[in-house]
Image (tube, coloured by chain):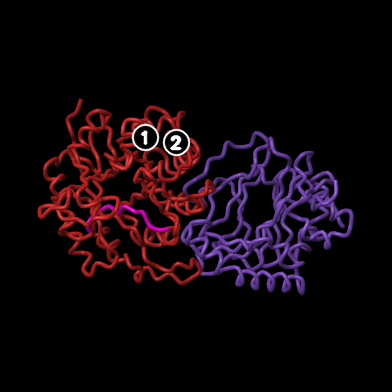
Amino acid sequence: MQGPTEAQTMQWDEEGYLVFTDAIENDELRRLQNAFDYWANQCKPDWLERVERGEQEATYFDIPNPIEKDEIFVDIVDHPSYYGCLRHFTDGEPMFLGEAVRVLPPWPLSYTGWHPDVPHTNPLHIKIQIYVNDVDPGCGEFAYVPASHKRGAGPYTRPLFQESMPGHRRFAAKAGAAVMFNAYGWHAAMDNHSLIPRKSIILIYEKRSPGQVDAEPFTSIAHLCTSPERRRLFSLEE
Amino acid sequence: MVRIDAQVHVFAKVSDAFPREADSICPADREESIEKLLAEMYAHQIHQAVLVQIGGTGLDHHAYLLHCLATHPDRFLGIGLISPNTPDPEAHMDRLAGETGIIGFRLFAIGGPRDPFAPMAVEEFDTYRIWKHAAEKDYVLWLYPQAADAHLIPYLLEVFPQTRVVLNYLGICPGKGKLSWDEKGRPHIDTSRHNPVGHTTYRLNRYENVVAHLSGQYAFSREAYPYRDIAGWHQILLNCFGSKRLMWASDFPWILGEPGYGPLTNIARELMPDISETEYDDIMGETARRFLRFPHLEYG
């Protein structure tokens, strides 16, 4: 497990994000894509019914309980491509909160406006967005405002048009790329002007803090968590 | 400042002069007259209102609405009803609108693919001709579609950016099987606090020709007036749309028994206590006056 380089640490501190171009590749990427497509296909009818009942958003579709569906959705949580950085930035105390295995249908608008996830009163909150298919410019790519994670940055307001956000950077990339970002910072998905759905996985972590540890969501994968490091990451051990 | 109630319903007993469809909520012998509405408005300093058709989509069903608009042309504007299945929607719209005071039409459906991943051919949507004619004639579209239709709206807004659109009832679109009627004869829509459909309709703030109603709280809340459990939805709408694109409405007559017309005129202050006087004036009338082009009325 490799920690961040000096350049990565500086980039993380100053800009609030890191890009891992080939985080998942080759057979592992194909395994991820196959599992994603299989379960998306399996779960879609139920999602459509829930949309019709007004119980779920129509603008994105998350595969429910992914870690219980395929081991690959567990393996990417502590993937060596980025886990060393994650561990370093959380002072060795990363805690996994959840995973959104998400597909965005083409829509004239982005499914979400610019926003930070948590205020600075929250423990450090980190997300990793992994592209499962190629995401070209204008195809719903993830975007981030560099340095907006810093305390006292801004003020920022949500513009009507995604592209109007001052200073933002867009992350079009090939399948298998991952963007790690500090979720104090402002981020969004850009509009998707193509007819191609965007497939991605959003991994959600926090720096471990007393009172936040909850093993219940992960007891069903305890058999996959055999190392002390992983058991602690999934809150299965104090 | 002008005070405008941006959605009310009035109807007469069924008669030859005023035919309409009857149901358990609006039986043939029930009436909620324009005089009753005017008394409430007068008592609570509400100057003007939008009368929204109830009792059927047929041309003859609109008789009482047209009568009220003709009798009080400076006080009311009207919204008619049209079914997506109307064979000649353009003729239907033109016969009802124009000099009558009817400025637009309410839609309960959009009529396109339910699967958001399906190809979207807008011209094939059931209501495409209605939208097109509204765009050509400057009619307002009053939207209260089902949840399954909410994602279709922006496709039409992209094609018809000139059409004025009003999202009813906080932008909420009822889910299938979620409508019931409470013991007071009011509609109740079972909606989670997370409000998934809101995540679709709030995004429509991108389109400057779209405004939203602050109304119908009684139908979504699980609490008594002032419905504080849904205060957050109001704040989100204010953040997304701003006061110049929000309109207060009472939804008379459903609210007469509980909580009463008077308390509802205070709902914006109750649920958004931090808004400025200007924002309050926008929500309580200025937005409706400007967006719907209400006639000037001497009041005071």
Labels 2 and 1: the sequence-earlier one: 2
Identify the residue at image location x=85%, y=49%: A237
Q: Amino acid at mark 2?
A: Ala
Do dots 2 and 1 share one subunit?
A: yes
- Which of these two is toward me, B47 or B263? B263
Q: Is residue B199 left or right of residue A86?
A: left
Q: Chain of mark 2?
A: B
Q: Is residue B279 visible?
A: no
In the image, which lettered chain appears purple?
A: A
Judging by the rendered image, the residue that carries numbered circle 1 is B259
Q: Residues within 10 Å of mark 2 (few under 14, many from 20)?
A: few
- Which of the 4 image quadrants contains residue A66? bottom right
B245 up-or-down from B28: above or below: above
Residue furthest to the top: B300
Q: Which residues lie in the magenta part? A: B137-146
The quarter of the picture where the C terminus of chain B appears is: top left
State left or right for residue A38 relative to residue B139.
Answer: right
Q: Does residue B142 belong to the magenta stretch?
A: yes
x and y, in percent, of residue A2 in the image: 86, 56
- Please give the residue where the numbered disc 2 appears in the rendered image: B224
| Residue beneath the point at 24% across and 40% down | B49
Q: Position of residue A182 (x, y in %)?
A: 70, 46
Closer-to-camera residue (A153/B255):
B255
**The color chain B is rendered in:** red
Q: Amino acid at mark 1?
A: Pro
- Counting from the top left corner in percent of width and height, residue A178 is at 71, 60
Q: Is residue A233 above or below residue A14?
A: below
